[in-house]
Image (cartoon, grey):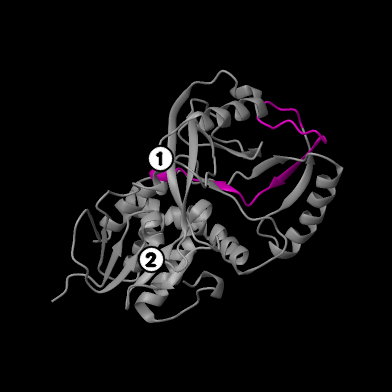
Amino acid sequence: MTRYDVTVRGAGIFGLSVAWSCIKRGARVQVIDPNGPGAGASGGIVGALSPHVPENWNEKKAFQLKSLLMAQAYWQEVKDASDQDAGYARHGRLQPIADDAALALAHRRAETARELWSDHATWEVVAASGAPWAPASPSGWLIHDTLSARIHPRRAVAALVAAVEAKGGHVAAEGKDEGQVLWATGTEGLADLSPPGSGIKGQAALLDFDARNQPQLFAEALHIIPHADGTTAIGSTSERDWSHDGTDTQLDDVIARARAALPVLADVPVIERWAGIRPRSRSRAPVLGAHPARPGAFIANGGFKIGFGMAPLVGEVMADLMLTGMDSIPDDFRA
């Protein structure tokens, strides 16, 4: 007699979100990861839940929008089950507008956002205020969207683990496959794809600066994320070619650019330097559904920069497929 209906291989954000969705439906679930929860890219520090720009609409953007709109209720439910806060808040985002051409594009995107986002969120052009927590803007204008949110990746992983265990699930370093098996093993699992995906290195830093109720910023191609615990994360690099998985002088450049973009950070101490390898599929979309190399098994991989934002809906569609056979996965996401 099997003890589990579902075995999830990998305790990153995709694996844990699928485990949580399955266990809420009454399945007996185990999560196995020899490296422990959040050991890979899901153990990062940035946590920007940011939408794609509202234009050239496709399945990926529609999926992401639906998932981002699920996030507040999703993380509240996790908190209620685990008694742990994932640090989620939807405070929006500010971005500087460089010039007249970018200003015209921002206005066009505001129009398409009204069509595509409906009354769920707004994308608008606002005058730069010159406030300390606002990036300088050469044009004098900023983009303000109300869809962007933040999360604390490590706390979110810990909250999901606690929620799964509170509902009777089991999270362990070792175990035997039982029931339906999902592989959510991040960069390591990309080798099973054909053509294989790749690991993209990212570096980020955590600063000792409390702006917890402020919007996140996107300036100098960097995310600047105020977290609920009174820290501020900045990042990240996107390195296709790398020789080691630690931090280096490229992170020094990230820190310098963030300080230049937001002078209030100029003398703020760096609490932590982080580097990790993020799983990116060849299509840059998540890879969901039947596993291409493991007959009878399933896969959820390729979160890359949008894993935490996609996680609520990834968990639901994979639970549908694994437990009931209902397949609502976008065609562009299939292995």
Q: Position of residue 294 (x, y in %)?
A: 32, 73
Residue 265 inside the magenta-drawn segment: no
Q: Name the one closer to the observer, 260 or 192.
A: 192
Residue 139 inside the magenta-drawn segment: yes
Mark 2: which secondary structure? helix
Label disc, if present, on residue 245 of the rendered structure: 1
Examine the residues drawn in magenta and state their main secondary structure. loop
**Of all residues shown, which one is farthest toward the left?**
1
From the viewer's perspective, is residue 220 above or below residue 67?
above
Q: Name the one closer to the observer, 218 or 152.
A: 218
The residue stretch that appears in magenta? 129-155
Q: Position of residue 32 (x, y in %)?
A: 25, 58
Q: Are marks 1 and 2 in contact (CB under 8 Å)?
A: no
From the viewer's perspective, is residue 120 above or below residue 295?
above
From the viewer's perspective, is residue 163 above or below residue 99?
below
Query: Which amino acid type is marked by label 1?
Result: Asp
Residue 64 left/right relative to 314: right
Q: Quadrant of residue 141?
A: top right
Q: Position of residue 298 (x, y in %)?
A: 36, 72
Mark 1: which secondary structure? loop
Q: Is residue 72 visible?
A: no
Q: Quadrant of residue 289?
A: bottom left
Q: Can you say which quadrant of the picture contains the N terminus? A: bottom left
From the viewer's perspective, is residue 283 above or below residue 123?
below
Q: Position of residue 226 (x, y in %)?
A: 54, 35
Residue 22 left/right relative to 209: left
Residue 69 left/right relative to 44: right
> Residue, x 44% and y 31% (percent of image)?
273
Label disc, if present, on residue 192 of the rendered structure: 2
The local crowd at label 1, few if under 14, some if 14 to 19, many if 20 or more residues have their Cα within 10 Å, is: few
